[in-house]
Image: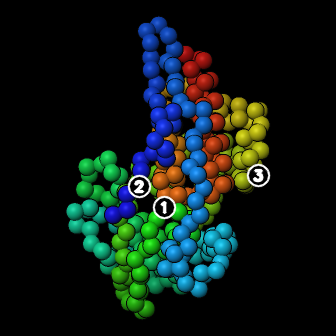
Amino acid sequence: MLQVASDPTSSDKHSYPHSQRRSGQSPAIQLPPTLSRPAYAEVSRDAIIAVAPELAEVPAEYIRRGLRPRANEMLGAFSALALPSFLLRSRLSSSLAVPLRSPSPFAYPTHILAVSSPKSSSDQVMVFPIHSLVLASHCAQLPRLPPSHQQPHSATLQLPVLPLSIPSPAAFSILHSFMYTHRLDSVLKALFPVPSGFLHSLSHEVVKNALSSGATLHQLSSYLCASASSNLQTLMTHAGHVKELWQNMAALGLHDPELWDTLDLAWEVLLGALNLAAGSQ
């Protein structure tokens, strides 16, 4: 099983503090001003060669960009699989026979990720289908994937199972989708409420502009604070969602700049909303 660290760094200053309440005072929210980015590491060339030897000389960024136009096709192939949402950890095998609901003209997934948390005692693991090249070209902290040999014209797919232990299995669904679509609006709205007008046609450039605009940050923070009815516990729950995504990104070695900038924006908006809510107590 591949197991990754639960925190991007071991530094206490990047730990996730909790809210504290003193008698007669408003709650004191203690959160780090920024979420640290791990040192950049390029994805493993060996991992890419293992799944696509013909791309041995192609830069990883070109591979990622080349995959984006095929995102809908690859995601469409998921619907052809009769795949459970969960499996039992105690019964995991090296491969899984996945029945096909119907033939698909698109490329089927090549592997199954069995995702769990090292802190969980549950026997259930979350199941995600994945295309090996998508995973290998995005995540720097993964080993070479086991080979996948699919039988053409078969009623089932025999897919290798890769157990993956990460800080937050639930938050992995955001990254799973992002690796295919690169939709920043989907990332942001999965974390907390955001005005629909801002999400419309959200691009990396819009994210960067928002980070440098105090007025935009205040508008987004005010919207989030209002959506939570200025409830600090609700906002701290949102903070937990952002923290879990951050931990997963760092643990998997997912260094996409537009994704990290979107995470920074989410954190700035959240801190602003918490300040507004604390001031209204």
Q: Tags 3 and 2 in contact by the CB under 8 Å rule?
A: no
- Tell me which numbered mark, 1 or 3, is placed earlier along the sequence: 1
Identify the image quadrant of residue 265: top right
Mark 1, Cα crowd under 10 Å, few <14 / some 14-19 / many 20+, is some
Residue 12 in percent (x, y) is at 47, 34
193 sits to left or right of 150: right
Q: Amino acid at mark 3?
A: Glu
Mark 3, Cα crowd under 10 Å, few <14 / some 14-19 / many 20+, is few
Q: Which residue is found at the position 46% from the left and 41% from the top? A: 10
Residue 79 numbered mark, or none: none
Q: Which residue is found at the position 47% from the left and 53% from the top? A: 251
Q: Amino acid at mark 2?
A: Val
Q: Tags 2 and 1 in contact by the CB under 8 Å rule?
A: yes
Identify the image quadrant of residue 80: bottom left
Residue 184 in percent (x, y) is at 64, 54
189 sits to left or right of 132: right
Residue 87 in percent (x, y) is at 29, 64
Q: Is residue 273 above or below residue 261?
A: above
Residue 141 numbered mark, or none: 1
Q: Give the residue at mark 2.
A: 4
